[in-house]
Amino acid sequence: MDVLHNLAFGFETALTLNNLMYCAIGCVVGTLVGLLPGLGPLSTISLLLPLTYSIPTAGSLIMLAGIYYGAQYGDSVSAITMKIPHASSIVACIDGYQMTLNGKTGLALFTAGVSSFIGGTVAIVVLSTMAPALGEVAFLFGPADYCALMLFGFLCVSFVTTGSLLNGLAMAFIGVLLGSVGTDVNSGAARFTMDLPFLADGIGLISIALGCFGIAEVVKNLDSGSQLTPFNGQIKLMPTWPEFKRIIPSALRGSVVGSVLGLLPGGGPTIAQFAAYAVDKKFSKYKHEIGNGAIEGVAGQAAADEAAARTSFIPLMAIGIPENAVMALMMGAFIIKGIQPGPNMIAQHPDLFWGLVASMWVGNCFLLVLNVPLVRYWLSVFKIPFSALFPAILFFCCIGTFSINNSLDDIYITVIFGFCGYMFMRLGLEAAPLMLGFILGPMLEENFRRALLLSRGSFSGFFTRPISGTLFAIIFAFIAWQLLTFFYTSRRAVPQEAV
């Protein structure tokens, strides 16, 4: 009953005319931001942060939060229609773009919209009922636990990749190597920079994502010489009942995965999408279709994105620890308004806390009402001739990359990875495992070093702690199961080949 009373109190704040307007502005701007290659919520919130000085406290925070979770749906639109991903929509390129090639763009975008609504709703329930308790979960994780968690994330490669497991692990290893480029945080030494100053801060995630997916796809289409567009003018927006029944279980699984990973520092939508995709490839009834344009490949990751975007507010508001760069900016917005996020925030500013939670559900409804009917307008991009569409895509890729650091070097790096992505396609390799390795690699190294420092060089800490010990037991059991399956399949295949 206390939760219902608190939510009712929060809706009193969220449903005021001014706060509704700020929520709508945040959702619309966030969606538009997600559509533009390279321009994510981080850069947008950075640009709009000075506006918080002139906007009331609740309205400014509601608007910035709307930009963050609104961008998750926009990310899916650009990934599904043009295979141009942001960090949180890389997995959407796999099945989402394949559905576009199969003439099911409307269905894919509808699935993303509905799944995002489901994921956001589940996460809001978690946020409102378990925020104080779940916020303390982060204190239970030490460096060894996070290291084990990152290694467990690499096991997702076997589910993310649709080809050879060995190729997937090799691509993930390349991603880890790319993630190690730049200045070592501990020693300050430059690693793999080839004495190039612009590599001192490492390679940007946006440069790799836009190059390996966006530019590579454009080059592939130009190389094929095909002038056919994936969209033929017929929009099938509403799914059939069997298709709708496939959306719900996947969206619910993604919601749970995203809600959990949104609580962990370094988690958030980027990792949640890979985990949700891995869960679907393991437990879905249609797992054999995933990777070839399955609805589950879109529904699960879209729900996980939205869920993780919302539950990532729990560590910030409950214990005062931002779990990613966007949350760090949100913390700056709180501090600008004279509010210190942390355990005392709920008690000292209940109207702001519960008003922000209630506004997320209002924003969820805004996104559903605005985006699902607008699917027909998103699809109009395919009416543009390829001769004009491809240069426009390349232009926005370059603008989005340049806008991050205002450096031409980032554009050069994007072009290089565009060529690499095209070569990956020609060789039958997938870029998604590379992105997973690039994302998890630096976090794995940081936590590994920190764990060894705390244990004075002893590896026993990785196995004696309950959380890390359990995770390592799961990892070893999974590897043993994979090896047994491989040898069993090989032995059964020998007599068939002999015949």
Image: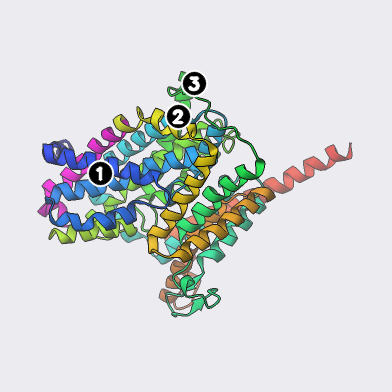
Checking the image for residue 26, the label placed there is: 1
- Is disc 3 surrounded by few (<14), some (14 to 19) or many (20+) residues within 10 Å? few
Quadrant containing the N terminus in the rendered view? top left
The amino acid on which the numbered mark 2 sits, given as a three-letter code, is Ile
| Left or right: residue 304 compared with residue 295 | left
Whichever of labels 3 and 1 marks the residue nearer the N terminus, that label is 1
Q: Looking at this view, is 134 or 157 the one in front?
A: 157
Of labels 2 and 3, earlier in sequence is 3
Colouring scheme, one of rainbow, by chain, secondary structure, one colour: rainbow
In the image shown, does 455 or 83 lie closer to the viewer?
83
Tell me which segment is drawn in magenta.
344-368
Front residue of 95/489: it is: 95
Task: Give the labeled residue for mark 3.
Answer: 242
Tell me: residue 195, above or below residue 496: below
- Image location (x, y in percent) of residue 343: 19, 57
| Residue 444 sits inside the magenta stretch | no
Disc nearer the start of the sequence (2/1): 1
Task: Tell me how far mark 2 sits from mark 3, CA to CA.
Answer: 9 Å
Q: Secondary structure at mark 2?
A: helix
Left or right of residue 36: residue 499 = right
Residue at the limit of the structure toward the top, as seen here: 241
**How many residues crowd around disc 2 within 10 Å: few (fewer than 14), some, or many (20 or more)?**
many
SS at badge 3 = helix
